[in-house]
Image (cartoon, rainbow, N blue to C red):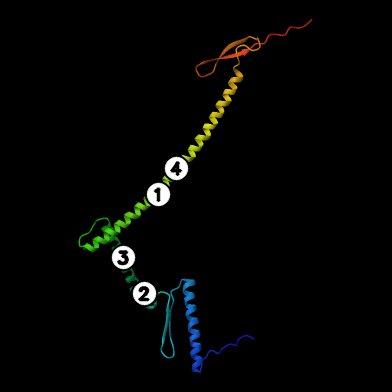
Amino acid sequence: MGRGKIAIRRIDNSASRQVTFSKRRKGLIKKAKELAILCDAEVGLVIFSSSGKLYEFASTSMKSVIERYNTLKEEHQQLSNPSSEVKFWQREAAILKQQLQNLQDNHRQLMGEQLYGLRVEDLQNLENQLEMSLKGVRMKKERILTNEIEELNRRGNLIHQENVELFKKVNLIRKENMELHKKVYGTRYENGNAVSSYVFDSGEGSNVPIHLQLSQPERYKD
């Protein structure tokens, strides 16, 4: 048999009420933790027992959750009123304008401009920022140069392999030419037959003697 449904009403027995409160409180906190982890949500949970004891859980900090809640609640209330909405956006525009001004001032100071009025501590912080930026630039430069050197080495290896293959092909062609030369150029006399020499132009500006063998005609028998 399954468990029967529990009526959602106040438990009269104080002992049972305390046991139920302890179980449900732990389960509620567990669910809040799971919601914060699984859904990347900012969760704040506040529980007061009937005796006035406080139990709380916050995924970040309870102060941060309450401040965020108050801010969003105030913004919601302001947006519901047209005049308040105008003031809200005016305030937002002023905040963004001030942030832009701060960024421009910081950029000029990083460029070495408008340094008047800065204290030694401010100058030291500015120097640290520049050193960190310079370090990042150098690391990026070294990484790019290293990649380019590796690519050049890879291309050099490919060219070297191609040269080796070409050298093998050239040697093979030379050997074939030598074999062909041996077949074309014979000895001056072979088997008592005369060899006549004729000169042909090789097309390379030099005359190469080519020896052709003339065989004696056979005599017919009567």
Give the amino acid at mark 4.
Asn
Give the amino acid at mark 2.
Glu
Give the amino acid at mark 3.
Gln
State how far apart marks 2 and 1 are (Cα). Answer: 50 Å
Which residue is at the front of the view, 54 or 118? 54
* Residue beneath disc 2: 85
State how far apart marks 2 and 3 are (Cα). Answer: 21 Å
* Residue beneath disc 4: 153
The C terminus, quarter of image: top right
Which residue is at the front of the view, 104 or 144? 144
State how far apart marks 3 and 4 are (Cα). Answer: 48 Å
State how far apart marks 1 and 4 are (Cα). Answer: 14 Å
**117 sits left or right of 206 in the view:** left
State how far apart marks 2 and 4 are (Cα). Answer: 64 Å
**Residue 220 location in percent, x, y?**
76, 7
Give the mark toward the camera: 3 or 4: 4
Q: Is mark 4 on a helix, strand or loop?
A: helix
Give the mark toward the camera: 2 or 3: 3
The vertical placement of 25 against 123, above or below, is below
Say whether disc 2 or disc 1 marks the residue closer to the N-terminus. 2
**Residue 206 location in percent, x, y?**
50, 16
* Residue beneath disc 3: 99
Say whether disc 2 or disc 3 marks the residue closer to the N-terminus. 2
Q: What element carries label 2?
A: helix
Task: Classify residue 129 by image quadrant.
Answer: bottom left
Q: What element carries label 3?
A: helix
Residue at 29%, 66% (x, y): give it: 98
**15 sits left or right of 126 in the view:** right
